[in-house]
Amino acid sequence: MQFRVKDDGATVHVSLEGQLNFAANEDFQALLSQLGAFKNKKVIFDMTALSHIDSVGLGLLYIAREDMSEAGSTVVLANPRDNVLRMLQLTEAHKTFEIQR
């Protein structure tokens, strides 16, 4: 997994690329460290280029949500591809996350 972070003031855009799974854990932890500097912002995870997510990847998003919430920020999942969207729907992630398509 690769990521890019862009802060435009009130919103932080995080572009995710590749696969969000167990192998991405270390990269995702680095991302969380970077996001720790942002307080009271809207954090949008752009999933346009995310080709796959599994249960571990979903767990990482929940960890990010919890960390961001403690910092006063909100997390939005944006533009998930069909297979990623299916995983989010199957796990009822829409009950926890705002999902923008």
Image: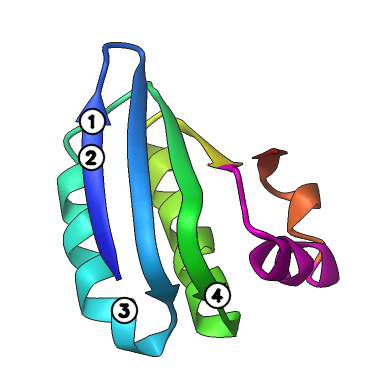
- The answer to which image quadrant residue 81 occupies is bottom right
Residue 8 percent location from the top left of the image = 27, 15
The rendered magenta stretch, by its main secondary structure, is classed as helix
Q: Residues within 10 Å of mark 3 (few under 14, many from 20)?
A: some
Q: Residues within 10 Å of mark 2 (few under 14, many from 20)?
A: some
The residue that appears at 23% across and 46% down in the rendered structure is 4
Looking at the rendered structure, the secondary structure element under dot 4 is strand
Give the vertical position of 70 relative to 58 (above or below): above
Q: Which mark is residue 24?
A: 3
Looking at the rendered structure, the secondary structure element under dot 3 is helix
Give the vertical position of 46 relative to 84 (above or below): above
Q: Amino acid at mark 1?
A: Lys
Q: Amino acid at mark 3?
A: Ala
Q: CA distance from mark 3 to mark 1?
A: 20 Å
Residue at label 1?
Answer: 6
Residue 14 percent location from the top left of the image = 34, 42
Residue at label 4?
Answer: 53
Task: Say how many tags the image has.
Answer: 4
Of pointers 4 and 3, the one earlier in the residue sequence: 3
Q: Amino acid at mark 2?
A: Val
Q: Quadrant of the C terminus?
A: top right
Tell me whether circle 4 and circle 1 mark residues in contact (CB < 8 Å). no
Q: Which residues are magenta?
A: 78-91
Tell me whether circle 1 and circle 2 mark residues in contact (CB < 8 Å). yes
